[in-house]
Image (spheres, grey):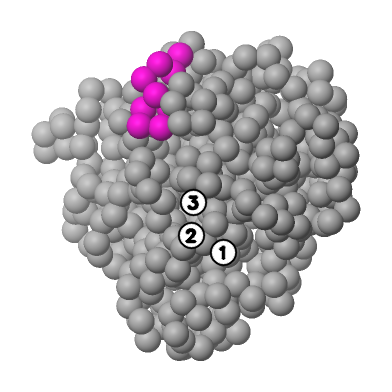
Amino acid sequence: MSPSKPVVESAAGTFVGVQHGLIAQFLGIPFAQPPIGELRFALPQAVAPLRGEFDATRFGPTPPASMELPEPFTYPSIEGDDWLTLNIWTPAPVAHDAQLPVYVWFYGGSFAMGNTAEDIFDGSTFARDGIVYVSANYRVGIEGFTHFPDAPDNRGLHDQILALQWVHDNIASFGGDPNQVTIGGESAGSMSVSTLATTRFAGKLFQRVICESGIGIALERADAAKATDFVAAALHKLPTAKSVGTLEAREAGRRVADKLRKLSPHNILTVFAPVIDGDLLQESPVASLSERQAPVTMIIGHNKREADFWRVFGEFAPPDGVLDALALALTPFRATRELTQAYVDAYGDTLSKQEIFVEFLSDAAFCAPSLAAQRGQATTCYAYLFTWPSSIHTRTAMHTLDLGFAFDNIHAPGFVAYAGPDAPQSLADEIHGSWVRFIKTGVPDDDWQPYRSEADLKIFGPAGQRNIDVLSAWKY
């Protein structure tokens, strides 16, 4: 076999990848059976060991999406049914006994869209720095996070867990240490990994967690059923898996995406979400993390102006009844009318109602849950605030803007399209370097202390601070 075609033999099968310099990559490896037919709305089923040599040189099919954002915030789309695949980047030549630390990445996308084929998520930089990097597809939208009375809940989370089980069983063959696994994600991916930190798998399938902009929420079944009603109405189907399942998955996703496209951005943040099912999730993850330490070490942070991201797509805050809209739209985030009044009291003399709307939404979805979890995890948590402003679009530290820096992929076309061409390499070195040290040692920097107060908050970018008074008004 050519050196440019590395081969790895594992319990899951024999995989032929591709090598670029000192990095080997293995793409599109199935970790579960295709979730179609009778398995469409079932919990994921492990795939049997593959026979022969598996061509792991290209990404697998992407999960059907139930939401689509305009350029440049789109995800690639690859047709096919075998959605549940993972990808591995590892130092070359692959050494089976290397016992390198492992980083498993789960993408964001409002639990409605996303996949691993996005160029920002290329794991070459982690492999370059001595880490075995894994990215895994999981079901989103209708397929993964719609509550049906005749199907198990949290299918997308169970996909993630099965991917982690595959990593535990096979990653040593790719040079990784199954007992030194960090999981990470951004936005819905961050909500996912923080949610997993509250489950029985924490400390077993993974030991460390990196949360970029998001701490897990979960809906009571009654609230989840209301979201299902929206999906069913968009599809002209009954709100059951049996009825919705009569539509092909990608077609169903497109129809719901078309319906969502007609709504104001603030109304589409919570259509899909995990569910408190009494099994995997006993309570909302943010409540759990705010009250008791998880058996893992965590990095938890967020961006300074998260909700500015949605302003890129046009008029964001509704022109009339702007603050009244908040409590209803953000009920899953524990928003109340009393909280909206607290924001009016805090910002009414300096900000317009539209600006207060943006502050409130940023805090509801991202900043306040992050603070609650930082306080709850305390001595096992490193807290940060990302403040670097893009030179284009909103020119603020909006949602998703940290990604290129964390991956040290600031020149990836997908990142440049919304971050601009002048992202500082020095900041990428700082953030990515901290992530690498944390994955390897559990400590991101010698001078970055676990969170006890705002004095321990790491600032990535220009000087900045949080409004602790209003953030502390949120209760979980």
Q: Is residue 67 visible?
A: yes
> Is 265 in front, or is 403?
265
Task: Work out whether 353 lies above or below 231.
Answer: above
Question: Nearer the N terminus, badge 2 or badge 1?
Answer: 2
> Is 334 in front, or is 430?
334
Q: Is residue 420 magenta?
A: yes
| Magenta extent | 416-424
Q: Are marks 2 and 1 in contact (CB under 8 Å)?
A: yes
> Is 105 in front, or is 348?
348
Q: Which mark is residue 109?
A: 3
Q: Circle 2 sits on which residue? A: 112
Task: Work out whether 298 lies above or below 411.
Answer: below
Q: Are marks 3 and 2 in contact (CB under 8 Å)?
A: yes
Q: CA distance from mark 2 to mark 1?
A: 6 Å
Q: Name which residue lies at 60% across and 84% down.
A: 149
User: Which amino acid type is marked by label 2?
Assistant: Ala
Q: Name which residue lies at 15% across and 30% down.
A: 3
Horizontal side, residue 113 vs residue 89: left or right:
right
User: Where, by quadrant of the figure, is residue 172 drawn?
Assistant: top left
Q: Which mark is residue 272?
A: 1
* Crowding near the residue tagged with mark 2, few <14, some 14–19, many ≥20 C-alpha atoms within 10 Å: many
> Is 56 in front, or is 334?
334
Q: Name which residue lies at 52% across and 61% down.
A: 263
* Crowding near the residue tagged with mark 3, few <14, some 14–19, many ≥20 C-alpha atoms within 10 Å: many
Residue 240 % position (x, y): 52, 85
Horizontal side, residue 25 vs residue 99: left or right:
left
Q: CA distance from mark 3 to mark 1?
A: 10 Å
Q: Quadrant of the N terminus?
A: top left
> What count of labels does the image hold?
3
Horizontal side, residue 293 vs residue 443: left or right:
right
